[in-house]
Image (cartoon, coloured by chain):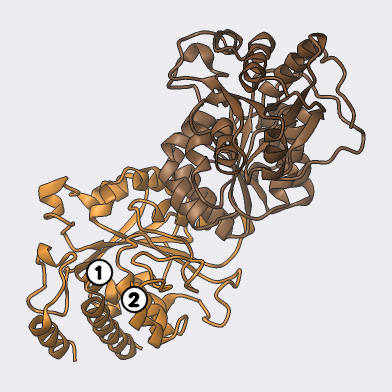
Chain colours: A orange, B brown
Amino acid sequence: MIAGIRAKSRAVRRHCMQMVYDAKLGHLGGDLSVADILCTLYFGVLNVDPAKPNDPGRDRFVLSKGHCTGSLYSTLAERGFIQLEVLKTYMQPLSRLNGHPNRNYVPGVETNTGPLGHGLPIAVGMAIAGQIDKATYRVFAVVGDGELQEGSNWEAAMAASHRRLTNLTLVIDRNGLQQGARTEDTSALEPLADKWRAFGWEVIEVDGHDHAVLLEVLGASGTNRPRCVIAHTHKGMGVSYMVDQVSWHHGIPNQEQYEIAMRELA
Amino acid sequence: MDVPAILSDQLHDCRGAFSETLEILAASDHRIVAVVNDSVGSSKLGNFRRRYPDRLINVGIAEQTMIGVGAGLANGGKVPFVSGAACFLTARGLEQIKADLAYSNANVKLCGISSGVAYGELGPTHHSIEDVGWLRVLANMTIIVPADRWETAQAVKAAAGSDGPMFIRVSREPVPDLVRAADATFRIGKSETLREGSDAVIIANGTMVCRALEAAERMAGDGADVRVVNMSTIAPLDVEAVLAAADTGAVVTVEEHSVRGGLGSAVAEVTSTCKPCHMRIMGFAGFQPTGSARFLCERAGLSAEGIAASVRAVIAARGAR
């Protein structure tokens, strides 16, 4: 299974590069940091069925860092929710594939995100619905690390641990960079794990590019509290000149850079 | 059309109608849940919590999360009634209302308690006279401002029975029960003509409807025949009723809200583009001082006499026909 997930991650990275290169728009740095997390979820963890995207018993996934649609749409396409051909329309006029996801146009998208700090509260609501119904489905949210500067996350963190939402797993894409600088040079998040523990969550820190480890920690729930997985990642992972470079938050590759990237991602 | 009797002295807080209706609906509709921001008491949801403890979700004093949680519950098949003081519910979580509810088209019902200047003495931080304005510009958002207990109950039933995001104002400011025909019905987007007349039309909603009726009574004593329309749904607006009102050439709107962005603006968008007529927009002109709701309304001319004066002025501006 790991080899399959790894192959999907590579395919998703290539799609992202192609989409952003064609559209001349997008957020490649974050697309590439989150790709392994998304592929592990969609090809190893989530109980979802592209033929029944609204099945009441499905697992829920919320991408709170909604600007990373390059990765999300590519993963949904590889998983069969949308056709691979549709990726060519990314951010083109009237495309279903907006720069931020719209659940009314893209099957598999659960809620419209884009403004930061929205995803976790919504995931908490989904998990409460499951708790009320004693349903077996699980709820996952992926947030960017910079996004944790939004206070709404911490409201939701309290509500989730207060209700002991063991069906909820949060993944933090901890690439250390936000739009303009390092998170620690902007409004420091550390000690991040301690913060989540203090808010009543079970915290696990992993290498966010290690599919086997991701599969293991995402495959199980928290025992008696919500689970927070701090996935240490690199912005721009997979493309040598992009790795850990803040300028690639929403940088657009030129032709030479595109060709180098595609060779590296082959 | 039944003409309401002279309004009784018996006045009622509409919150009870809201919470009792929700309790009754929740007995048979297990999808219904209530979400609050530590507002169980002010929303009169104590009984709901006793009857359905698992379905009352108190997220704490956290409006952004309250609205996000509402969206998540709707995703999980619930019909959440998200209830809190209108001023905080609508303003603190406005981006969540835009993205998570309106843009996502989520089936969440926002219930703005103590709207308008109900918290008069507490000052403008607690006045909610902008709520309709900033929600009215959001696509997909239905907005209802009920006039009395019956209409509040009907609005809650309609909310439970319809899909999509909605905002209902639930006033704590006591109002009389309006007299209606036994077979009166409520429909989202359909106004109610409570009094016929062709000299001028008062379009009002919420706590102002009873005052508009009183104003029309007074005008009848002067020989003027003034129609009173209860425009309880602001979005989608009953355009047909507005155009019919504009036919008289003299329209006054009255609302417990800012004069900018609310009912008056919605009506003026229709009249100014389709059928220009003389208009007066009555409401609050800016941040209000401290004082009881009644004091603030009367000070702003939102009284039977003040409304009647505006109607006389708009008839005079139009001239004789």
Identify the amino acid type marked 1: Gly
Whether residue B155 sits left or right of residue B62 in the image: it is: right
Indicate the position of residue B173 as horizontal and vertical percent values. Answer: 65, 19
Examine the image and state in which quarter residue B211 appears: top right
Q: Quadrant of the N terminus of chain A?
A: bottom left
Q: Is residue B55 visible?
A: yes
Whether residue B164 sits left or right of residue A86 in the image: it is: right
Q: How crowded is the residue under tag 2: few (<14 C-alpha within 10 Å), some, or many (20+)?
A: many
Indicate the position of residue B232 as horizontal and vertical percent values. Answer: 68, 35
Indicate the position of residue A74 as horizontal and vertical percent values. Answer: 35, 79
Indicate the position of residue B233 as horizontal and vertical percent values. Answer: 66, 39
Q: Could you say which disc has been placed on residue A90 in the image?
A: 2
Which residue is located at x 70 percent, y 21 percent? B13
Q: Which residue is mark 1?
A: A26
Quick check: A70 above or below B117? below
Q: Earlier in the sequence, mark 1 or mark 2?
A: 1
Q: In terms of secondary structure, where does tag 1 sit?
A: loop
Q: Is residue A159 visible?
A: no
